[in-house]
Image (spheres, rainbow, N blue to C red):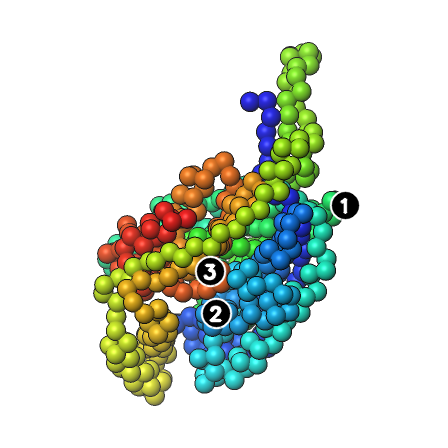
Amino acid sequence: MNRVETPQSRVLAAAGRADITPPVGIYHRMWGAALHDRATGVHRPLEATLLWLAPVGGDRGDSRLLVSLDHCILDSAEMQSLRGAMAAATGIPAAQIHIALSHTHGSGWMSRSRSHLPGGELIAPYLDGLAGTLAELARSVQPRLVPATIVYGVGRCALAAHRDFLDAERETYVCGFNPAGLADDTLVVGRVTSEAGDTLATIVNYACHPTTLAWENTLISPDWVGAMRQAVESHAGGVCLFLQGASGDLGPREGFVGDVRVADRNGEQVGYAALAALAGLPAAGTEFVYRGPVVSGATLGTWAHQPSGAAELSRQAFWRWESLTVELPYRHDLPTIEATTAEREHWLAEEAAARGAGDEERLRIARAQVEQRSRQLARLGALAPGRTWPLPVEIGLVGDAVWVLVPGELYQVVQRTLRERLAPRLVIVSTVTNDWQPGYIPPASAYGYGIYQEIIAATAPGALEVLIEAI
């Protein structure tokens, strides 16, 4: 082999950014163990980052809008509403607009169903304003489309750790750092450069739950994603688009704290790893070619970057997107709405009793149990009728890269397997995209151990394997 090609995509591109920070005082509780309801301040702003992509020389109506949004989960109807607002503003069909949640747990739970709770009266106005903000962002970016090249690279980052840990003393699994667990450290980056040489955007695709900040944190926060973006943008230029990878069983090594400095430190770790990978990327439209020997003290082999040929440039401009729906079977032992409601009523009574007794630890446990049942009811109420969940998947073949955009929370085995089987193509896997439902989709091997993600999963063992094969 005397030439090395770096994966690239030739496209039309434009990018933009908008601040989407909710007001202080809005309902913020995301954790069952939290004793607060309202946000007391802002750690870092929440942001919406948009990357508009279109085929070179093709129909701009075939554009894809990728929006990275600093929220944990949004209701399915809310996601459709946001995509619809952007579609109305741009003329691009909503099906070609993809909202990828960063999944920060510091954003608060923005659901209209929580409007009756303290701070909940601010949720509906905020979400209505968010739709307008995203529509205006898309409208402002559209005229700036220019020919550009995405040059991709792969780095490594050790922040993400396996998070299914066996507490041997108590004989139970907990969701937390597992020092012996396998963790995918793959970090995919992309540099989007115009023909004039300007960096329009950078892409960071990494799998790690933004759960540094937990029940002790009362501040609105993008978690580690915020500091990561700041580090990347301050050195690489452009806006940084973050896409959450398959992180169902991955979280930060140090997490579940209230100290925002830990979140910033975690973010810097990912940001610097991304910058290292970006620094190693060659100029767009080039390949690394062996030039031959030079006799010196030793006979040295010389390599140099040179412009790619016409065939390579044509391949890098390839553009094709496919949508598929994968029917994932439900588990046979799903809890019923009736039983879950009864359990919730029991824990509500326990919460009232603990509050009356002034017992904070008992109150924390009761509130957590109520929250778990409330979320279970929301999940059960959102499930499609029948025996399967129809999971929509969007697959893009863009030059040398494969983009896989999928809802839900998938385990790392998805990206590991796809990258192995689709090599040498570069693969980007973006989860929690366009919807959070049906929630966690663990592999068959994770069932039967009492692991949190398996307990609350709606899909049956084997569903994830069906999804991988379909993709």
Which residue is tagged 3?
432
**Amino acid found under the numbered disc labelled 2:** Leu
Which residue is tagged 1?
196
| Residue drawn at x 28%, y 76% as measured from the top left | 337
Image quadrant where residue 113 sits: bottom left
Give above or below for 469 relative to 141.
Answer: above
Helix, strand or loop at mark 3: loop
Of label 3 and label 1, which has the lower sequence position? 1
| Side (left or right) of 416 relative to 270 | left
**Amino acid found under the numbered disc labelled 1:** Ala
Dot 1 surroundings within 10 Å: few (below 14), some, or many (20 or more)? few
Spot the residue most to the front: 59
| Residue drawn at x 76%, y 45% as measured from the top left | 196
| Residue 427 drawn at (x, y percent) | 50, 44
Residue 234 makes an appearance in the image:
no
Helix, strand or loop at mark 2: loop
| Residue 141 drawn at (x, y percent) | 69, 61
| Real-space Cα separation, disc 3 to disc 1, in angstroms | 34 Å
Of label 2 and label 3, which has the lower sequence position? 2
Which residue is tagged 2?
74
Residue 381 makes an appearance in the image:
yes
| Side (left or right) of 442 relative to 240 | left
How many labels were placed on the picture?
3
| Residue drawn at x 56%, y 61% as measured from the top left | 97
